Amino acid sequence: MVSIAEILQGRHTGKTVELRGWIYRTRSVGGKVFVVLRDATGILQVTISRDGVPEKSFAAAEKALIESAAVVRGKVVEDKRAPGGYEIRAEDFQVLHFAQKFPIQEDLSEEFLLDVRHLWVRSQRMTTIFRIRHTTFAAVHQYFRDHGFWEVHPPMITPAGSEGGATLFELDYFGRKAYLTQSWQLYAEALVLAMEKIYYIGPSFRAEKSRTTRHLTEYWHAEMEQAWVGMDEVIRHAEGVISHACQRVAEERADDIVALGRTPDFLKAVKPPFERLTYEEALKILKAKGIEFEWGKDLRTLEERALTEGKSKPIVVTHYPRISQAFYKARDSKRPDLVLGFDVIAGDGVGEVVGGSEREIDLEAIKKALVEQGEDPKRYEWYLDSRRYGSVQHSGFGMGMERLIQWICKLDHIRDAVPFPRTPSRFSP
């Protein structure tokens, strides 16, 4: 058995091979059936001649519909007319399962394709994205491990939120209130005092009713935390991990990237450092572009688009007003009304990909911030212990993996960056 990718790489030209897959397209002309098979690595044409295979095999090839499962044995030849420039000339063709008429045809609505997502994931577009997703996840793991980070695993069920109660998914935990995690943040700050350099990739949940092209209620989060360092050091890691993912995808998935409208050269150029500006500098740029924006508010899609317009690399915005930020972010000693926080913002309408900060280490300042945000500090007693026993300077960030993939792949909508998207209006299939 061989894969289609191996054939398209010219590794089996002139050889007799066996290939298994599913029928992607099929047509009959005279005494021949032209079947395009797909597997996880690509598509390949198979030519089945009436006089070249057993009668039973030819009849099966004529009968089989799209998505029927088949095994073909034959000779690999170069043919510029075939998809990818190669084909198999069949000596035998067996249909292992005759599929019913496939419900997905051309020009169907997005809503219908979401309803049959369990079938749409077989499309060439989706499998191309999934291959890039695989490479992106591998690159993020590799980056952190190569830089001495330990992988750790926080719980998914938590007693309190880390990003504010408005976006928490509540659940009944044996008669008590519990929540799905918004972030590993609070647990990271406990673990970093043990392991010093840690990271995690896993799901996070946000009960946001945002119906946009860049929001999911369930998404994959790459998060890191490091002891003994400030904001600047983790910004360098944010730049580094994004760049590393881009380099890996450009090297390993070049054909897939081209198929989606990016070029490998575009991704190869994504190297540190990224352009950096403060929140207040960003407001000045926006004002010069005719966009009035109230100081203290978070940047919205409109502002992020304006700031990244014409830029091929993400930008970094730092020093946000404390009024809009989470309770654990450290105040700037020079400007107590600002925090030592940052976002990495990508273009093409994707917006914020990374959000991070240096963490506040003053116990009383955290208690005060919790009260200001309507939280009861008693619910965070276990977390506050990290400030009572050997607290040190530490910083970290969270990166939305689907947003990174959306930007790398130049996708119009984030829901295509994940196999089965969860949004405010959809939790099935």
Image (tube, grey):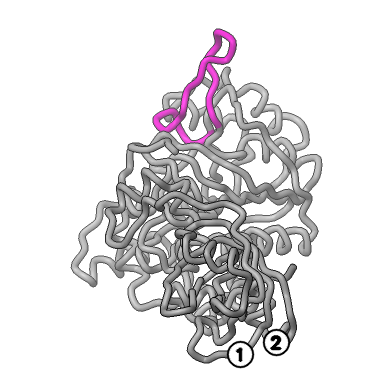
Asked whether 122 falls inside the magenta stretch, the response is no
Secondary structure at badge 2 equals: loop
The residue that label 2 is drawn on is: 13
Pick the front one: 176 or 135: 135
Can you tell which quarter of the image residue 175 is in?
top right
Instruction: In the rendered view, tell whether residue 397 sits above or below residue 275.
Output: above
- Which of pointers 2 and 1 lies earlier in the amino acid sequence? 2
Q: Which segment is the magenta one?
A: 162-180
The crowding category of the residue bearing disc 2, from other C-alpha atoms within 10 Å (few below 14, some 14 to 19, many at least 20), is some
Q: Are marks 2 and 1 in contact (CB under 8 Å)?
A: yes
The residue that label 1 is drawn on is: 78
Instruction: In the rendered view, tell whether residue 116 sits above or below residue 274.
Output: above
- The amino acid sitting under disc 1 is Glu
Where's residue 167, x and y in %? Answer: 42, 33
Residue 236 can be seen in this image? no
Asked whether 163 falls inside the magenta stretch, the response is yes
Q: Which circle marks residue 155 in the picture?
A: none
Where's residue 79, x and y in %? Answer: 55, 90
Disc 2 from disc 1: Cα separation: 7 Å
Residue at position x 48%, y 66% from top? 62
Position of the C terminus, as image quadrant, is top left
- The amino acid sitting under disc 2 is Thr
Residue 352 can be seen in this image? yes
